Image: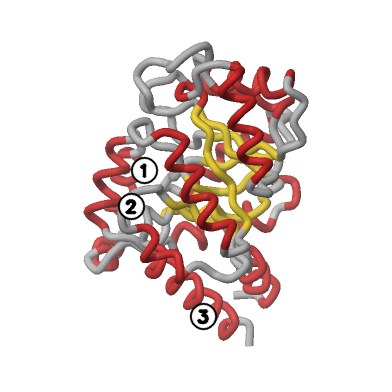
Amino acid sequence: MAESDSELVRASFARPRFEIIPMKGVEEQLAHLPADAVVTVTSSPTRGIDATLALAALLRREELQVVPHVAARSVADTVQLKDLLQQVSDLGIDDIFVVAGDAQAPAGQFEGTVDLLRAMADLRHSLRIGITGYPESHAFIPDETTIAVMHAKEPYASYIVSQICFDPQVTAGWVAAVRARGTRLPIHIGLPGAVDLAKLVRISMRVGIGDSLRFVRKQGGTVARLIGGYQPDALVEGLLPTLADPAMGVAGWHLFTFNEIRRTEAWRRDLLTRYARSAR
């Protein structure tokens, strides 16, 4: 591998985003986060935004940069939204990630992400805002709709984070298509962390990314590597041309840890070491 490519990979993993879930036992994993980590905290339809903000507060006490997820369908009204934004400000947080949320029915006046983003704009906040992109088709939403919604969200957003996709060519094609449609927001490419395979398969099928998971299973030698758990090395290698192309505007990586923080961080450190050796 060329020294420039090795340096590019190492630089891109110097400070990735770690996504964690506010559920029992995650506190025991937090000590494995890098000291300067950017940590995003998901929003659960069952535990609500309070669980997200409680974990965000714990992380802020450790002086970590925190990005709480706000699920539009879990916010009742503008009054609750205004209170939520005040809590975020009180925690010293300047970046949130807005998603539609998995709730079957909205809790109030916000049907989806665009509604919430417009209401936030009316409240004149100063936050950076991340939105989701879908390299693979959404489990329940047609591609035409996700593209239209992307254009509607773009004026309110600061960056995009892509959903997990196990086929690097699909992700690369999606990034190119986003750019071809004129969207210029920086993109953080979503990667599964180094996680238990059974957990990864279960969650991937649930969120509708089974097609590219089947792609992984077809790759020669990959199955053997998966026996001890998944590691995203092949994805990193496959996405290197996209990462290296300035026109694609890749800002970095977003690691879906599924709360396997120790394992994912150990993989990241090992990757940095291996790419440093390959550059010699």
Quadrant in which the C terminus appears: bottom right
Indicate the position of residue 234 as horizontal and vertical percent values.
Answer: 44, 61
Quadrant in which the N terminus appears: bottom right
Residue located beneath label 1 in the image? 212
Q: Residue at x 56, y 23 (%)?
A: 80
Indicate the position of residue 271 as horizontal and vertical percent values.
Answer: 50, 74
Q: What is the secondary structure assignment of the residue under circle 1?
A: helix
Q: Quadrant of residue 95?
A: top right
Q: Amino acid at mark 2?
A: Val
Residue located beneath label 3 in the image? 274
Q: What is the secondary structure assignment of the residue under circle 3?
A: helix
Disc 1 to disc 2: CB gap under 8 Å: yes
Label 1, residues with CA under 10 Å away: few <14, some 14-19, many ≥20: some
Q: Residue at x 43, y 16 (%)?
A: 106
Give the Cα separation between the discs numbered 3 and 2: 23 Å
- For marks 3 and 1, the one nearer the N-term is 1
Q: Amino acid at mark 1?
A: Ser
Disc 3 to disc 2: CB gap under 8 Å: no
Q: Amino acid at mark 3?
A: Arg
Indicate the position of residue 138 as horizontal and vertical percent values.
Answer: 42, 28
